[in-house]
Amino acid sequence: MCGIAGILTQRPPGNQSDILRRMTTAIAHRGPDDSGFYETRDASGHWYLGLGHRRLSIIDLDTGHQPMASPDQTIQLVYNGEIYNFQALREKLKALGFQFTTLSDTEVLLHAYQAWGEQCVEYLEGMFAFALWDSTRQILLLARDRFGKKPLFLYSTADTLLFGSEIKALLEWPDLNRQIDQSAILDYLRFRYVPGPKTLLKDIRKLPPGHIAVWKEGTLTQRRYYNPPDHQLPVSHTPIDDPVGRFQEILDHAVRIRMISDVPYGAFLSGGLDSSTIVALMAQHSSQPVKTFSIGFTESEYSELGYARQVADAFQTEHFELEVSQDHLIEHLPSLVRSRDAPVSEPSDIPIYLLSLEAARHVKMVLTGEGSDEVLGGYPKHVYERYVSGYQTIPSLIRSGLIEPLIHALPYQFRRAKTAIVNLGLENPEERFPRWFGALTFAEREQLLRDFTNVKDEVDHGIFETAEGNSALRNLLYFDQTSWLPDNLLERGDRMTMAASIEARMPFMDHNLIELASSLPEKYRIHGRQTKWILRQVARQVIPEAIIKRPKVGFRVPVNEWFRTSMRDYLMDHLTGPQSLTADFYHRKALDRILAEHIDGRQNHEKLLWTLLNLEIWHQEYRPTA
């Protein structure tokens, strides 16, 4: 696990070498163990190329230095990630005549490119972002893994291309304009994160998941090599004899190959279904007690430490616990906005970061349960979405004049019912899908914002587009897998763990597992009102029944209560105080109403208020220009 950065520019010779080193220093937390650089000019002599690398050593500690060159020195590679099937690929490449001088997956990737060219990405199982300079073809190849587990940001003009694992690396370029993208503000309030390829900075974008980009002679072209299978109608074939057994086999394999490491490793354990299943499978493959790490809150009703301890006891893990309060939230939030280069979309970013710091004292890599809900249908929205068409057959006068006012009047304890009714009434999936996680409707956003009437929505509509006739569940899962996951949850997991200099691996994001789940009838994911049905069948064979049956809590931080009590002044100062940089974004009456409703306990606006608070903190940290 590492950080990469690079420069391609026609600018006159100057301090590019110094800038390249500053770019890698800015992301040194991603790779504190080693650094490396490669600098050259293209065949014309007009373009300077610099590749930089920071290394967190996990596999082949002694000989995995980067940039790594091909034996004839014509290819140079910098790479961030892990290729889990590198051992199998090594044998395949050996059969093709390639020789290896290291044990690293980096060398496997290098020879895979020599064997298969740009199509090498289709052979890789893992998480990755890499940059490869081919001096023979005079091209720079950039690539990102299928689901966007590893990040890659770009800045491109007529005479310069910059890339890096984090935005802060690109900001070292002296001529980069920090102009804010106003349409991204609209996106942020619509999604609670900025969906790719945009960022809040107008001149910086993301290379989308499952894409490669090729630079040649000053031109950058981009193509998609992978699309999640829920984009298409279910595969029509004879069902396999034992879907549950096959699912367990692939999941077990996904866990086992992610345990390959030359350094100590462990697992994040919440005590829920996903992480408990991962720990149970890890225990089957480990000769030593698995190290597990759990976090809870001083407010006991939000703490899952007891459930996690139950699982740890069942599998005799070496267990570590951490407890946090709102003081940690206030203390770390600005620094984590800097770590993410963006507003912190979820309050749970902070406990994940603190848990990563604790884990880093004992291990350099952890397995997590991330991705299970978005692959297998684990949220209430995946159940509710199936009732959209039925609810919308109710005459709109009855819905808007009777049902919705009654639901809206309920106290915030009924937040799930309130969310469901509001969302079921939204006919446009492009409005409804983001709204399931507490973002603003188009009307709510318009009521709140000032001076954004001339700003156009410019969201990539592809995240909502699937095959004609696809089911409501598959459409929503496709949105989750192409937007909510890469631009929010996976981004969070990468930044929070890398800020603590540890690596996180996610067995549920194995693309073979995802493709199996997508090929099965929907009842294997949502069965009646039961979520993640197929995983529950597997879990019954490996973890305590009490964990399977307990209700889903989620990694929830009690900011609802904190915003009404101990964090009230902090919130008000940031949103309405004289030093606020974003207060003028909003109609003051609308913002005051939202604050009053939340503080008085009439409505729960915690997600919106968290969203606005983090947008303000991001402005304070990055000082973008209008």
Image (cartoon, rainbow, N blue to C red):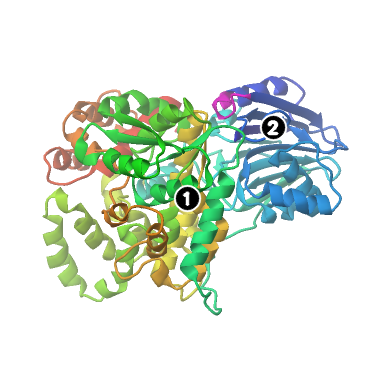
> Callout 2 environment at 10 Å: few (<14), some (14 to 19), or many (20+)?
many
Q: Which residue is mark 1?
A: 281
**Which of the two residues, 549 or 565, is positioned nearer the viewer here?**
549
Counting residues from the start of the chain, the first of labels 1 and 2 encountered is 2
* Residue 386 part of the magenta segment: no
Q: How many marks?
A: 2
**Residue 138: horizontal and vertical position, in percent?**
82, 42
**Residue to which mark 2 is pinned:** 7
- 485 to the left or right of 416: right
Q: Is residue 28 magenta?
A: yes
As helix, strand or loop, the secondary structure at mark 2 comes to strand
Residue 486 visible, this orientation: yes
| Residue 359 placement: quadrant | top left
Where residue 263 sits: x, y (%)? 58, 32
Tell me the quarter of the image containing the C terminus: top left
320 or 23, which lies in front?
320
Q: Secondary structure at mark 1?
A: helix
Q: Which image quadrant: the N terminus?
A: top right
- Where does the magenta region start and end? 26-33
Position of residue 390 in the picture relative to residue 228 (left or right): left
Residue at image coords 31%, 43%? 310
Q: Residue at x 56, y 38 (%)?
A: 203
Residue 455 percent across, percent down from the top left: 42, 47
The amino acid type, in three-letter code, at marker 2 is: Ile
